[in-house]
Image: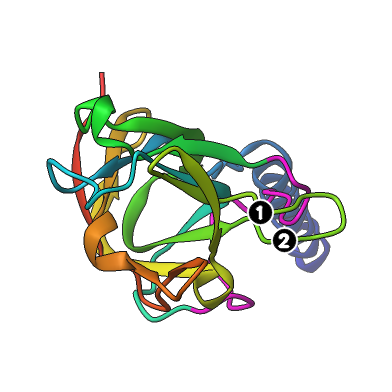
């Protein structure tokens, strides 16, 4: 009787072990992070550009973060594989002749969820690129110094739905953001930029 009881217990333990093993091998689920699409555009806020014939802004990268106070180097920036400083900028013309129609800067996939900050990185002068941003006034092209605003944080709360799209428009106030320093124009350290968003199609 004792031997039979031991054998029954051994069989029970073996059955439990097999069940656990099968659950570990085949019972797992794939927790892939759902993604959505974010399309970012830039537009001039006002109906005029304060005497500028053309304003050309060279945007190097656009990233978003769920933390409104995140700074470059912090965790959480999306998308994570954006190459910075590779001089593959998107040139955006903010002249009034475009009738303030938003100009697409980038369309990218990001993890679905709530975000609280958009950040623009502007291309800077280098040995490869001279005066990537500039203004045209009275027919003369003049460099626009963006060194004080190389990275521009724009606090704005929006949600990217899983398998959906959000169109985010950054409204750039040219008149309040550019100053004439005498022979050269400069983008102030905190350019006046607001944001709006709509569900994409």
Residue placed furthest toward the top: 201
Count how many numbered circles sit on residues in the image.
Answer: 2
- Compared to residue 119, the image places residue 112 above or below, namely above
Residue at image coords 39%, 70%: 180
Vertical side of 200 occupied by 32: above or below: below
Furthest residue toward right: 127
Q: Quadrant of the C terminus?
A: top left
Graded by Cα atoms within 10 Å as few (under 14), some (14 to 19) or many (20 or more), the crowding at tag 1 reads some
- The image position of residue 136, as x and y in percent, is 44, 43
Q: Position of residue 126 (x, y in %)?
A: 80, 60
Which residues lie in the magenta part?
71-88
Q: Is residue 133 above or below residue 163?
A: below
Q: Is residue 63 visible?
A: yes
Q: Which of the two residues, 149 or 201, is positioned nearer the viewer here?
A: 149
Secondary structure at badge 1 equals loop
Q: Magenta part mainly helix, strand or loop? A: loop
Residue designated by label 1? 131
State the residue position of label 2. 125
Percent of width and height locating residue 18: 74, 46
The Cα atoms of the two marked residues, 2 and 1, are separated by 6 Å
Is residue 21 left or right of 154 when viewed as pictured? right
User: Of label 2 and label 1, which has the lower sequence position?
Assistant: 2
Residue 161 belongs to the span the image colors magenta? no
- Identity of the residue drawn at 72% across and 62% down: 5
């Amino acid at each position: 009787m004792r031997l039979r009881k031991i054998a029954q217990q051994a069989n029970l333990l073996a059955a439990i072990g097999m069940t656990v093993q099968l659950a570990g091998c085949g019972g797992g689920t794939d927790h892939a992070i759902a993604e959505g699409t974010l399309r970012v555009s830039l537009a001039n806020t006002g109906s005029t550009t304060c005497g500028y014939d053309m304003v050309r802004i060279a945007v190097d990268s656009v990233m978003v973060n769920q933390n409104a106070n995140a700074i470059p180097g912090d965790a959480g920036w999306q998308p994570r594989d954006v190459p910075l400083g590779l001089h593959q900028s998107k040139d955006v013309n903010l002249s009034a002749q475009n009738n303030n129609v938003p100009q697409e800067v980038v369309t990218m996939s990001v993890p679905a969820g709530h975000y609280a900050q958009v950040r623009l990185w502007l291309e800077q002068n280098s040995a490869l690129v001279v005066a990537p941003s500039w203004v045209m006034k009275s027919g003369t092209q003049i460099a626009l110094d963006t060194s004080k605003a190389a990275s521009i944080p724009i606090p704005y709360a929006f949600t990217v739905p899983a398998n959906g799209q959000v169109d985010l428009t950054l409204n750039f106030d040219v008149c309040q953001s550019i100053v004439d320093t005498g022979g050269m124009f400069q983008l102030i350290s905190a350019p006046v930029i607001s944001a709006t968003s709509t569900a994409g199609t």
